[in-house]
Amino acid sequence: MADNSTDGLKHRINSNTISEKEEENVETKEDVPTIKRSTSEDFTQYISEMNPRWKSWWIRTIFTLLMIGGFLAVILMGPLALLLLVLVIHTKCYHEIISIGHQHYKKYNLPLFRTLSWYFLGVTNYFFYGEITAEYFAEFLQQEEMVTFLLQRHRLISFLLYTIGIMLFVLSLKKNYYKVQFALFGWYQLTLLIVLTPSHLIIQNMLTGLIWFFLPISMVICNDIWAYIFGFFFGKTRLIKLSPKKTWEGFIGGYFATVIYGLVACQLMCEYEYFHCPLNFNATTLNFDLKCSPSPTFQLTHYVTINPTIHQLYQALPTIIRNGMTTIMALCGFHLQSNNTEVWLYPMVLHGMLLACFSSLIAPFGGFFASGFKRAFKMKDFADTIPGHGGIMDRFDCQLLMGVFVNVYIASMIRAYNPGRLIQQVMFMEKSDQVLFYQNLKDILTTKGLIQ
């Protein structure tokens, strides 16, 4: 009995103690003012508690919109800004790939690895951009004799600079590390080939006409966005082992979305000379001229005469349906004329369809190639430059393959000769050679009856 009384007394004492502490806590809470969290803190907590899948979605979406907005802003700044943008991007891509090699081989403490990698980048840029300067800025630069001398002997100077790099590499060789050093040498030479050569060709595409720059790049962006959207919501079947997140649903959805975008974008850009005129530098205004007479590729051309029976069926449709179909066809580049009996379109629209097919079916393999490279070094991304996307190279791996294809396509199928570019090249010839060129051209044109 005594023990039970004691236990009951202890229980009542503990209960009283707890209740007193609770009262103290209540009083304390009432005395201390409540601190409200800021909106940014609430948003940060919301993001941290979000499902990782949706968190990745929103981060990727936000930075995609920011990148697209920035890209459009640079386009509005003009061709010179675009040239600078390409230079910055390919330099950053080169840096990301070279950094992987540096991290992988830094344990060997090899001399001049970083120095030589940047030296060869500078020499290659000098070669490529010197070629562009000689072709497009000759009229402006020929006033300076020293500049004219350098550009006339540009390839020789470029080769000598490259040879100096080879000599420095040979002098840096260390015993017992020959194999590693030659592996590194091959690393940055292959990186130069993969990154700088396509970027140079992309610039050549741009100078042929901004449509050859903006259209393929935007197609790859469109395909990447819609493939991600379709894959995110409907993706179930894996496309390729190298990229576990790529699905057949995303791949197919991205294809159809890119083709539709390509038709509409081609139609709009063909109507503005800003996009289809070749870029010719004006030495007077110190800017590029974007005015020209459109070439046949950018002129409405008659392609098909509609069968009378099909025309009658079309005319029998309700007016609202017929007008809607006509509007949709016009947006996609197919114009009905002569009382809806003929189909006219810009030839560029057909080229755009082929570019759209390549950008959505073949160009993604540039991304798969990059994925295989990252898997070889057990990396998720090339860098963490862009939240939700990875490095710059992660976003431009497909663009490099697309840029090369467009350059080859122009040379093979379009052959968009630029008379202004030819004149710029003539301006860098010796004065005696310029006179000889003029006399020979005059004789040829006179013989053909083109001039008297």
Image: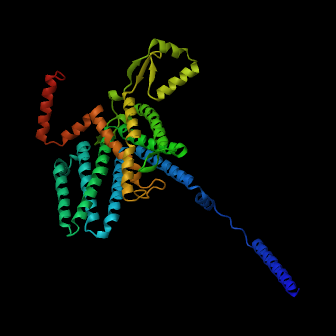
Would residue 271 be found to the left or right of residue 431 on screen? right
Residue found at the very far front of the displayed protein: 1
Q: Is residue 359 above or below residue 38?
A: above
Q: Is residue 19 above or below residue 49?
A: below
Quadrant of the rendered image containing residue 49: bottom right
Q: Quadrant of the N terminus?
A: bottom right
Q: Which percent across, then down, holds residue 408?
A: 29, 38
Q: Which residue shows up at 51% across the image and 42% down it?
A: 230
Q: Which percent across, then down, holds residue 204?
A: 30, 42
Q: Quadrant of the C terminus?
A: top left
Q: Which residue shows up at 39% across the image and 48% down it?
A: 368
How many marks can you see?
0
Residue in front for this viewpoint, 153 or 392: 392
Q: Which residue shows up at 19% across the image and 23% down it?
A: 450
Residue in front for this viewpoint, 234 or 434: 234
Residue found at the very far bottom of the displayed protein: 2
Quadrant of the rendered image containing residue 360: top left
Q: Which percent across, then down, holds residue 412?
A: 27, 34
Q: Is residue 154 above or below residue 40?
A: above
Q: Which percent across, then down, holds residue 212?
A: 35, 38
